[in-house]
Amino acid sequence: MTKIKVGIVEDELLIARSISMALDDLGYTFTEASISYTEAMKMIEIEKPDILLLDIQLCGKKDGVDVASIVNDKYHIPFIFLTANSDSATIERAKKVNPHAYLIKPFTKEELFASIEIAFNNYQQQMQHKLQNQSPKSQMNLAIFVRENHSFHKILVNEILYIESEENYVRLHTTHAKRIMIRSTFTDFLAQLPMDIFFRTGRSHAVHLDHIEKINPTEIHLAGHRIPVSKTYRDDLFLRLGIK
């Protein structure tokens, strides 16, 4: 289980301390505050946060917008701008680097929570959309995050053996013999996955095609598991696999 890790880039120490306390109360993990462009770049490289809280005004010549520009080009993680300035010039400059959210100081713990949750969720949706439009070869090294409360499981697409529906939940079976339960409908979860490498075999199962070891008219064998194949999906499955 991996919690969202929040990188803090804030040069006002009292505010940074307040943010840390709020993040701790909310159940997130977080880094020590970076106060400059240089410290922020070092923190991102070493700590590898999942999302940034990024003050626009920082110590030194380069500011939070400069950090955001590098994040977009190199690290591709979501960031939330923090600022006491809501003037049009600041906002227009910030908009050019496409922040995932924008918090005006002072803000409450509830506002911080909402911004992180919405920003990270939107980022995940964007990544899932990119995943669906990538080639199968590229998809193998990509990951999805599946949520449970404030925590997320990071799962490589190629590590999913098969997916099983259980009423309002979905259970993931992985190559590491882990079983992960997610609150989601089967259809909604499948919509997040690249269906050129996953195939639905019935009302409650879908399999990763590359993990299939053996197949017959009624079931699929993969890594010691037997997955039923319904008549409705069998012909399409055989066609997909080139079986005549």
Image (cartoon, rainbow, N blue to C red):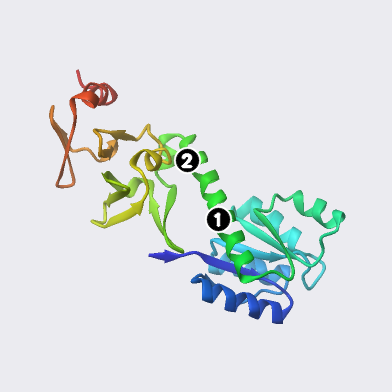
Mark 1–mark 2 distance (CA, rounded to whole Å): 16 Å
Residue drawn 26% across and 21% down?
Answer: 239
Could you say which quadrant of the image residue 49 lies in?
bottom right
Which tag, 1 or 2, sits closer to the chain's start? 1
Label 1: which secondary element: helix
Q: Position of residue 87 (x, y in %)?
A: 85, 58
Residue drawn 28% across and 38% down?
Answer: 206
Q: Nearer the viewer, residue 160 or 62?
A: 160
Residue corresponding to mark 1: 120
Residue drawn 87% across and 54% down?
Answer: 89
Residue projecting furthest to the top: 244
* Position of residue 180 in the picture relative to residue 14 (left or right): left
Q: Nearer the viewer, residue 158 or 79?
A: 79
Q: Position of residue 180 (x, y in %)?
A: 30, 56
- Under mark 2, the amino acid is Leu
Q: Which mark is residue 66?
A: none
- Under mark 1, the amino acid is Phe
* Position of residue 159 in the picture relative to residue 94 (left or right): left
Could you say which quadrant of the image residue 78 lies in?
bottom right
Q: In this rendering, does residue 31 appear at all? A: no
* Position of residue 1 in the picture relative to residue 11 (left or right): left
Q: Residues within 10 Å of mark 2 (few under 14, many from 20)?
A: many
Q: Is residue 232 above or below residue 109?
A: above
Number of residue marks: 2
Label 2: which secondary element: helix
Residue corresponding to mark 2: 131
Q: Residues within 10 Å of mark 1 (few under 14, many from 20)?
A: many
